[in-house]
């Protein structure tokens, strides 16, 4: 598991600080991290991934201090998919996925049979097998995200942290993406995903974490977290709540246009 | 596939290496060349072995090094317009060279090196050190600051050179101007071997980090998360490229365009993987500079043109062609 303890972090020019006294990501669960823009979600994820050293507090990966851990050995257990992914560097899908083997392969990066197997299985998982020879510039937005996810999966991590992975995708692709995360978690991976799509997060997460101005406002099952009062408090009165027709899981929807408001 | 592509570059490199020494003012026969080795010291053989061959070797080495540095820097700085000379390293070298030319008191000789070369290296090293200090911050080295610092140092050096130019005697101006045009005319192998202690470690560092650079080019956050020590790689690539550039510039002057165009050509021909691009850029860059130098030696024969003029005049139009015929890589 990944444990965050007594984390604080300040941002220049902002009067609140990120402060998380305890957060645990377990193997086999999907943890959805939601909250308004600028509430500290990405920063929290960067701290959990070891990309950013918090001002105080500790991140532990399976009981070892993440900041003190060698980057390569951390990368064998912990995968991170950033929000911004450029494709200026025009690799083929297979080359990109092969790069995920970095923490497992020393030196010049010659790939062995184990590496090939890992690459194939992550291409398979993400549905990119048939596109493996394509260049990144020839992929659609959804395919590109999946290609990068395949690269992270080729690390064969036990924990996966994703920052807005489905933001640029259309609804069917978003659904497929979250279903894939769900499946990976059932196979034992611990997954934390930052997303703006509260409905998908609620539907596919085992637990939700609602962050507001750097504090954990609520952490628990989607039903526990998404109460009417809390949603109004965080997202304002223009967000209405309903129920998912299949599961009864809470869903959020915008209020219809009204004449009396500016 | 990769090995095969590299073989193509290597064949071109070898061909240029074998053919160029035979081309130049005054014909040299294979017999004269061979008999020179057997102790028959005829002038033709002497020209071949002590002027042409070292000169071609220097062209191959310098062109190759500049292209490798250019290819690495373009990735490090995420900017396709960066070349080895963008960062003020050559500016520092030029300032050092001009100082020596302007103040004869500085003349000295140290082993195979004249003071001009020594001061060029010192100038380049000073610039390199200064740029790195400027770009250092508590959060590590930012490539943006690095680029900005490099360009600023370059401008300051240009200002210093203008000042010296204004104050200098006409004689030293001519010498300096000739230095700025770049030239590969060396005698014997001493100077050539002399730049290796700087050049080889520099190039070695770049090649060593080729794979890491691939990751950084793709996404720095992803690279970090996949286990790349981004800060270390950045520093090593900057210092390695700086050393190699300093070594080359101190001996041949700022020969432009090879370090800018060859990397683009290689990426266009062989993809973006730096493990392929760097060796290929070395081979193609070396061949390109050797060809340009052969043209420089022969086009106005018996007079020689400075090779910098040729690389700019051939390279410029080629680059424009690249610009309008393809998307940027």
Image (tube, grey):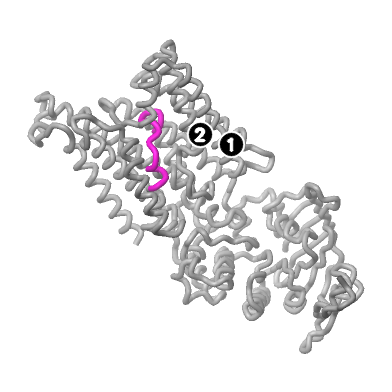
Can residue B96 be seen?
yes
Q: Which chain does the numbered disc 2 sit on?
A: B
In the image, is A8 to the left or to the right of A228?
left
Position in image of residue A154 (x %, y %): 55, 66
Q: Going by the image, does B53 lie left or right of A19?
A: left
Please give the range of residues in magenta. Answer: B248-261
Q: Position of residue A43 (x, y in %)?
A: 74, 56
Q: Is residue B179 above or below residue B144?
A: above
Answer whether residue B46 is magenta in the image. Answer: no
Q: Residues within 10 Å of mark 1 (few under 14, many from 20)?
A: many
Q: Is residue B232 above or below residue A35?
A: above
| Residue A20 locus on image (x, y percent) | 83, 57
Q: Can you tell which mark lies on residue B149? A: 1
Side (left or right) of A155 relative to A12: left
User: Do callouts 1 and 2 mark residues in contact (Cβ within 8 Å)?
Assistant: yes
Q: Residue at x 38, y 26 (%)?
A: B177
Which residue was labeled with disc 2? B88
Q: Using the image, name the chain to which the residue with label 1 belongs.
A: B
Q: Position of residue A224 (x, y in %)?
A: 86, 75
- Residue in the picture at 58% in, 36% down: B149
Residue lying furthest top in this view? B105
- Dominant SS in magenta: helix
Q: Mark 2 packing: few (<14 Cα in 10 Å), some, or many (20+)?
A: many
Query: Which one is in front, B83 or B7?
Result: B83
Q: Quadrant of residue A234?
A: bottom right
């Amino acid at each position: 598991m990944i444990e965050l303890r007594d984390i604080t972090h300040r941002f220049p020019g902002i009067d609140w600080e990120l402060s998380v006294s305890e957060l645990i990501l377990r193997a086999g669960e999907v943890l959805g991290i939601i909250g308004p823009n600028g509430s500290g979600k990405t920063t929290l994820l960067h701290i959990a991934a070891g990309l950013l050293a918090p001002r105080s507090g500790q991140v532990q990966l399976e009981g070892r201090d993440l900041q003190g851990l060698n980057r390569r050995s951390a990368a064998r257990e912990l995968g991170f998919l950033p929000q911004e992914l450029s494709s200026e560097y025009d690799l083929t899908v297979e080359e990109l996925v092969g790069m995920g083997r970095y923490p497992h392969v020393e030196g010049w990066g010659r790939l062995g049979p184990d590496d090939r197997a890992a690459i194939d299985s992550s291409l398979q998982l993400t549905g990119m097998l048939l596109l493996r020879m394509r260049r990144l510039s020839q992929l659609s937005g959804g395919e590109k995200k999946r290609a990068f996810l395949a690269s992270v999966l080729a690390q064969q991590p036990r924990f996966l942290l994703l920052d807005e992975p489905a933001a640029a995708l259309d609804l069917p692709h978003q659904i497929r993406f979250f279903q894939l995360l769900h499946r990976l978690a059932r196979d034992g991976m611990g997954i934390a995903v930052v997303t703006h799509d509260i409905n998908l997060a609620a539907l596919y997460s085992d637990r939700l974490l609602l962050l507001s101005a750097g504090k954990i406002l609520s952490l628990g099952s989607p039903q526990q977290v998404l109460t009417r009062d809390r949603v109004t408090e965080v997202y304002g009165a223009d967000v209405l709540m309903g129920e998912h027709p299949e599961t009864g899981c809470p869903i959020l929807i915008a209020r219809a246009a009204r004449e009396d408001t500016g | 596939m990769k090995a095969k592509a590299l073989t193509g570059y290597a064949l071109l490199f070898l061909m240029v290496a074998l053919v160029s020494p035979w081309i130049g003012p005054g014909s040299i026969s294979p017999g004269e060349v061979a008999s020179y080795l057997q102790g028959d010291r005829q002038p033709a053989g002497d020209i071949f072995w002590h002027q042409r061959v070292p000169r071609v070797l220097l062209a191959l080495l310098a062109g190759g090094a500049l292209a490798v540095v250019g290819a690495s820097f373009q990735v490090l700085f995420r900017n396709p317009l960066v070349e080895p000379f963008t960062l003020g390293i050559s500016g520092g070298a030029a300032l050092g060279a001009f100082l020596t030319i302007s103040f004869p008191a500085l003349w000295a000789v140290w082993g195979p090196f004249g003071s001009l070369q020594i001061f060029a290296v010192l100038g380049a090293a000073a610039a390199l050190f200064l740029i790195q200090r400027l770009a250092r911050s508590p959060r590590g080295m930012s490539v943006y600051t690095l680029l900005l610092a490099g360009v600023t140092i370059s401008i300051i050096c240009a200002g210093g050179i203008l000042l010296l130019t204004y104050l200098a005697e006409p004689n030293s101006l001519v010498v300096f101007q000739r230095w700025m045009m770049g030239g590969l005319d060396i005698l014997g192998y001493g100077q050539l071997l002399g730049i290796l202690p700087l050049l080889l470690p520099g190039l070695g560092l770049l090649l060593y980090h080729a794979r890491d650079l691939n990751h950084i080019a793709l996404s720095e956050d992803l690279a970090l998360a996949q286990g790349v020590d981004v800060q270390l790689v950045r520093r090593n690539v900057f210092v390695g490229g700086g050393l190699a550039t300093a070594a080359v510039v101190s001996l041949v002057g700022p020969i432009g365009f090879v370090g800018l165009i060859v990397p683009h050509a290689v990426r266009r021909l062989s993809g973006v993987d730096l493990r392929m691009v760097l060796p290929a850029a070395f081979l193609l860059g070396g061949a390109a500079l050797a060809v340009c130098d052969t043209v420089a030696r022969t086009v106005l024969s018996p007079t020689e043109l400075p090779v910098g003029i040729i690389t700019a005049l051939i390279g410029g139009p080629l680059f424009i062609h690249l610009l309008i015929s393809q998307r940027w890589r």
